[in-house]
Amino acid sequence: MWRNIASNAMTFLVVLVFLAGGALIWAKQEYSDAGPLAVPICLSVQSGSNMRRVSDELVSQGAVSSGALFRMGADYTDKAGQLKAGSYLVPEGSSMSEIVDIVTRGGASTCGTEVVFRVGINQAMVQVRELDPVTGRFEEVAEFDPAQGEAPEEYTSVKQKADTRFRVALAEGVTSWQVVNELRQVDVLEGDVTEVPPEGSLAPDSYEVRPGDTLESVLSRMQSAQELILATAWQNRASDLPLKTPEEALILASIVEKETGIPTEREQVAAVFVNRLNAGMRLQTDPTVIYGITKGEGILGRGLRRSELDAATPYNTYVIPGLPPTPIANPGRASIEAALNPDTADYVYFVAKTLDPKDGHVFATTLDEHNSNVAAYRRLEAQRANQ
């Protein structure tokens, strides 16, 4: 009898071990397999939260099939204590293992609210945007000019949240004075600077910032980025350019930046000025004259006067030979590269193609051809005046 009891007990233990092993294999498989999430979601992890709260939220949003198994997996992989606050994009079909990795690896939030401080040529704007996890696109919640009255509630309500991301975005062609003047209005940055960085030394780009960052540190990042862009472009420059130093290249790039906003014609505009420099011709470009008047501190807001075009100033390229003494704006990477690798065409003239700046320019190699193009443009002006 005892032999039968022992045999049955052993059989029972074998079955239990088998079942336990099978359950473990199933649990591992369930933890690693694709999850039930049908569409991406934005998961917010608050400061001081824990895996139970996160797992409950995931269950409620249909991202995991079992909160208990999610927590067990986090414990088993020693990640339960590594939860990081933030807002995280959880892709559709994410496994429990992948979600645990998302909420514990740290770094910047990948979804939720984003505040963008845009420094543009004509004005600065603040945008509050929310990521739609389904489309992967940011939807605008609010937009306002920080210099015009109080910020809206949509901004003040998210400014203090730990998972809100902040970016500073510089448009190509802004001046250093504009950058400093507008960044002084960014209320998440601290401190000030006593001097405006040299013109052209700030790289137009998008920079992630954090509340408490100093204005000086952000400007330093922009200068370091521009130094790298210029050094790389100078190293890869075309041969036989009439440019002796990287600083001269930066000056020419800033002129190209202000003369055209059409990406496909930057090299052509650069070719015109390179060909003029090689031929000993004056550059004769309005943006340099304008900079000589404004010093980059705001927009001229009117046309140039005849007296200003005739005045002998360091920036009047209708009068002086060669390049002006400094850049006239902060050029972007594309304009720097265009200045150092211009089109090989023999263009020495260009004029606007139509009255719409978006239509770009028409280029010419001879004065007769250029005069014909100018006449066509004047006719368009006359037609508009008579309408």
Image: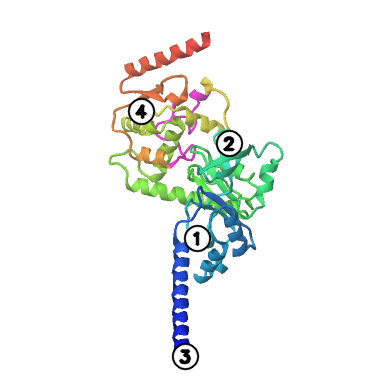
- Circle 4 residue: 281
Marks 4/2: CA–CA distance = 29 Å
In screen coordinates, is 239 left or right of 299?
A: left
Residue 209 visible here: no
Q: Earlier in the sequence, mark 1 or mark 3?
A: 3
- Circle 3 residue: 1
Task: Tell me where residue 279 appears, x and y as whole percent.
Answer: 31, 30
Q: Earlier in the sequence, mark 3 or mark 2?
A: 3
- Circle 2 residue: 297
Marks 2/1: CA–CA distance = 54 Å
Q: Nearer the viewer, mark 3 or mark 4?
A: 3
Q: Nearer the viewer, mark 4 or mark 1?
A: 1
The relative height of residue 63 versus residue 257 in the rendered view (above or below) is below
Q: Secondary structure at mark 1?
A: helix
Marks 1/3: CA–CA distance = 49 Å
- Circle 1 residue: 96
Q: Earlier in the sequence, mark 4 or mark 2?
A: 4
**Which image quadrant is residue 103 in?**
bottom right
| Magenta residue span | 308-332
Q: Specify few, some or many for label 4: CA neighbours under 10 Å numbering under 14, 14-19, or 20 or more.
A: some
Going by the numbered disc 2, the residue's amino acid type is: Glu
Going by the numbered disc 3, the residue's amino acid type is: Met
Going by the numbered disc 1, the residue's amino acid type is: Met
Pointer 3 with pointer 4, Cβ within 8 A: no
